[in-house]
Image: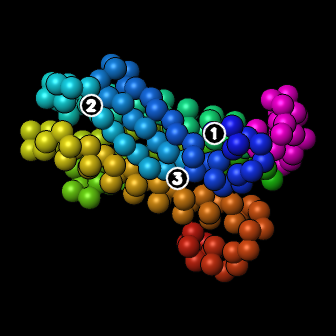
Amino acid sequence: MDHMWNGEVDLGERLRALTVTATSPDGGIRATVTGDNRLSLRFRPGTYRWYDERGLSRQLSGLGTVTWVAWIRQREEVIRLASGRSRSEAEQSRQRHDDPGRREFAEQLRRLECAGRSAGHAVRISLSGAARWQVEIAEGTLGARTEQAFADEVVTAFDDLIRDRTAQLTLLRAAHFDIGVPGAWIRRATGTG
């Protein structure tokens, strides 16, 4: 894997190779997210049957926050290493580019609200700003689904959330930076024109 950091692999490949794993606050659930936003969810053997919807919602919300923060930090580190900058150089670069337009973009990014619903409508995940995760599980879901079926529901809700976030980020970037999206399209998509 050393060749990846010697310039032989482009940044896109480095980001796709990124993998982050985290554990729920109670240690019963493990999530792995890859650089291309693929989630896998595993329960510690024997733990799934002991959860109720409310308790599992809390554990998954905490797990989502911890995993996402770790994923963002790891992604920033990959970008920093690919650019060949030290941590202090990366921080200085962020401060140099701190203009009113970027500050407004960052503020709107902090207020961004995204949501996803599972294929079976049993799980809803919302993401507020950069890191506040909330997972809601419909009453009766755990008793009606096997561990794997429930994990699959969470994955489809996460996929839906990522689609929503990607679309909203594209519109936000287009509104603040010239990324080649015509203004008329942005206004139509955001309902402002």
Residue at screen point 40% across, 31% down:
63
Mark 1 or 3, closer to the camera: 1
Residue 71 horizontal side relative to residue 122, left or right = right
Q: Residues within 10 Å of mark 1 (few under 14, many from 20)?
A: few
* Position above or below: 52 against 174: above
Instruction: Work out whether residue 162 or residue 20 is closer to the camera in this orientation and state it.
Output: 20
Q: Residues within 10 Å of mark 3 (few under 14, many from 20)?
A: few
Is mark 1 in CB contact (under 8 Å) with mark 2?
Answer: no
Rendering coords of residue 143 (x, y %): 9, 39
Instruction: Write down the residue under mark 2.
Output: 43
Which residues make up the magenta segment?
Answer: 80-100
Is mark 1 in CB contact (under 8 Å) with mark 3?
Answer: no
Chief SS of the magenta region: helix
Instruction: Write down the residue under mark 1.
Output: 1
Q: CA distance from mark 3 to mark 2?
A: 22 Å
Indicate the secondary structure of the residue bearing disc 1: loop
Indicate the secondary structure of the residue bearing disc 2: strand
Mark yes or no: residue 61 visible: no
Mark 1 or 2, closer to the camera: 1
Specify the quadrant that holds the N terminus.
top right
Indicate the secondary structure of the residue bearing disc 3: loop
Amino acid carrying label 2: it is Phe
Instruction: Write down the residue under mark 3.
Output: 36
Mark 3 or mark 2: whose residue is earlier in sequence? 3
